[in-house]
Amino acid sequence: MKFVFKAKNQTGEYETGEINAPNKDAAINILQKKNLFPVSMKEEAKSGNDFMKSILRYYDQVNDKELVVFFRQLSILIEGRVPIVVALTAIKEQSDNAYFGRVIQEMIEDIQDGMPFSNTMEKQSAVFSNLAINVVRAGETSGDLKKSIEYIAENIEKNYILSSRVRSALIYPAIVMTVFFIIAFLVITFIIPKLTAIIKDLNADVPWYTRILIVSGDFMAQYWWAVAIAIVGFILGLFYYIKSEDGKKEWDQVQLKLPIFGSIFRSVYIARLSQNLAALLSSGIPIIRALLIVGEVVNNEVYRAVLIKAAEEVKRGGTMSDVFRRSYLMPPMVTQMVKIGEDSGQIDTVLAHIAKFYDQESEITTKNLSTLIEPLLMVVIGIAVGFMSFSVLMPIYNIAGQIK
């Protein structure tokens, strides 16, 4: 966040300017460390260029691979007792991502101004997750920053692998169906009308399915551009809706109920929340705060609601396993293992085992997915191609037979 301030210096003169900080208190603290005494402080008003900035920011991203490398390098340098500013400078010089380089440079300047490392990460919340920020903050408090950074690197790497599996499972059927629909669009628009023209010239009686194909071909030949615009508009509108708050909630529910894919999504989300929760608890973060943080980073509104309920239950003196048991999203095995972990006081260890199990489960399911989906895709494509061929060729054969 950017704040506009007016402050007095040690000589009593007024100074004005802008300062970046995660919140107002942090901004005041930075000014005080510079021997400035704030008189007024307010958040900078958003300009009309914010929309354009948000579009440009889409291209300025830091992927999970770059974050893993960043935290692993930082961990090694800290272990070698290299000062944090020197370590960040060395990492910035090796980074090929210009945007990430600017982010690291801002972090270096903030640290030199006296801001803690976790606060500089919080200021760059577009790059660093709330989970990573809190783990680093816990490491700063405990004095074991290196271990916390290693936790983050491993956590990001595991989350990246989980997400990659889902993308890999979806990309094959998505490509096949996209190519099929493009070819079908071209065939119906440009080829079918020429073939059905022969049938129409003969003025012969044709079955209902051929009439459907003729009408569809004639319509597409004349209004293909309108159909193309409608399809593109529908796809863009669908993506826009899914990105909205209400749309994301609905999509998060739908994806868990999808045939075949639903089990993969459930395994991935359970593995992710177990893994993230284990990392936070191992870092010494209280369970209520850990549950709320994981709810923010699990990236599914349905599971987020379960974790929020669990946090509220624990706050009232209950247990997390009680909430999990009442949710259809949590398999009985997960509930029972969490209960054992709560009773034994080793909940972080148990959650790590749960994450490992569902990590393996998602890996096996995604590997077998192509074997399950490929025959189904071939059947769907075969039926569509067979219908078009049958609708065009059979009337022609019948007419040819009548001529003889």
Image (cartoon, rainbow, N blue to C red):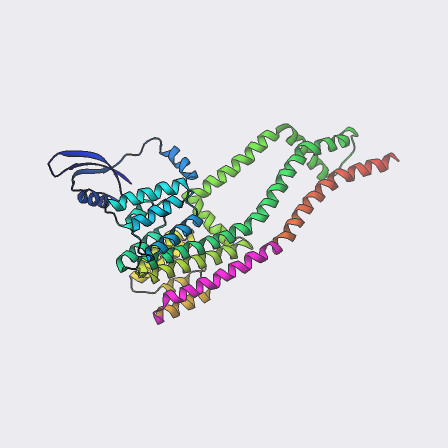
Question: Going by the picture, which residue comes out furthest to the right?
Answer: 404
Looking at the picture, how far across and down is residue 341, in whole percent? 38, 68
User: Quarter of the image holding residue 286?
Assistant: bottom left
Question: Going by the picture, which residue comes out furthest to the left?
Answer: 12
Please report the residue visible at 67 percent of the width from the left and 36 percent of the height from the top. 187
401 relative position to 370: left or right: right
User: Quarter of the image holding residue 224?
Assistant: top right
From the viewer's side, name the closer residue of 109 and 245: 109
Please report the residue visible at 23 percent of the width from the left and 47 percent of the height from the top. 114
* Residue 72 covered by magenta stretch: no
Question: Going by the picture, which residue comes out furthest to the bottom?
Answer: 344
Looking at the picture, how far across and down is residue 308, in whole percent? 35, 56
The residues colored magenta run 343-372
Q: Is residue 37 above or below residue 375?
A: above
Looking at the picture, how far across and down is residue 317, in whole percent? 29, 64
Looking at the picture, how far across and down is residue 267, in whole percent? 48, 58
Q: Quadrant of the C terminus?
A: top right
From the viewer's side, name the closer residue of 87 and 384: 87
User: Quarter of the image holding residue 104?
Assistant: top left
From the viewer's side, name the closer residue of 165 and 317: 165
Q: Which secondary structure class fits the magenta region best?
A: helix
Number of disc labels: 0
207 relative position to 72: left or right: right
* Residue 345 covered by magenta stretch: yes
